[in-house]
Amino acid sequence: METLDGPIYEVSKDSDWYKSATKRKYDINHFFKSFKEKYGTNKGFVFYHSDFFGVRMGTEAYELFKDEILKNPKEKDFYPFKKRSKYYKEIKALIEQIEDICPFKAHDVFGTNNVSGSQWVGDRWFFGVNNEEYVKSTEVIPVDFKEYLKAVMETLD
């Protein structure tokens, strides 16, 4: 496991951002569990958002859905579902149940292009930043680098 570079901030567990992100993680795990129960596998299924999902070539999902996907890949080895597939609306509805979060929230909290990385350590969410002076949010708390490393080491044990 790699660690972040300092300075380090932790997203407050009381913040709406943290609650939304943890709900999204839960929803994604629940989605893949439900998908596997319904279709027998989730290996190779990929989604970017509710309108763009498909399977990776050479996987169980590819073999299962090969008649329901486009003939040519959109990206390397990624085959999206046909919009007219009998499964499209069904899978789309499942994906739409996943909590939606703003992908640019970190820029709002830490400053544009100021994030050097992020990491979940157990139930704690850390961010490394390039410059502390741009961090202007009550949703994050500065963390001593040694405390962060201690949290990382505890999860490795």
Image (cartoon, grey):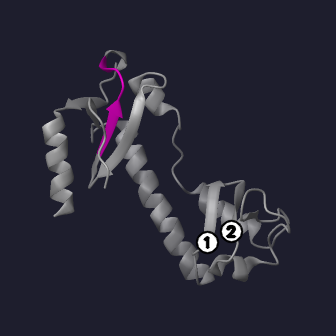
Residue at left offset 40%, top offset 34%: 116
Q: Nearer the viewer, residue 106 or 154?
A: 154
Does the magenta run of residues contain 128?
yes
The label shown at residue 55 is 2
Q: Position of residue 25 (x, y in %)?
A: 43, 56
Is label 2 in contact with label 1 (beta carbons under 8 Å)? yes
Instruction: Examine the residues drawn in magenta and state their main secondary structure.
Output: strand
Residues rendered magenta in the picture? 125-132
Circle 1: element type: loop
Q: Residues within 10 Å of mark 1 (few under 14, many from 20)?
A: some
Q: Quadrant of the C terminus?
A: bottom left
Q: Position of residue 26 (x, y in %)?
A: 42, 59
Q: Residues within 10 Å of mark 2 (few under 14, many from 20)?
A: many
Q: Name which quarter of the figure residue 66 lies in.
A: bottom right
Residue at left offset 67%, top offset 69%: 56
Structural distance between the alpha carbons of marks 2 and 1: 5 Å
**Which residue position is annotated with label 1?**
44
Q: Name which quarter of the figure residue 11 lies in.
A: top left
Residue at left offset 53%, top offset 38%: 103
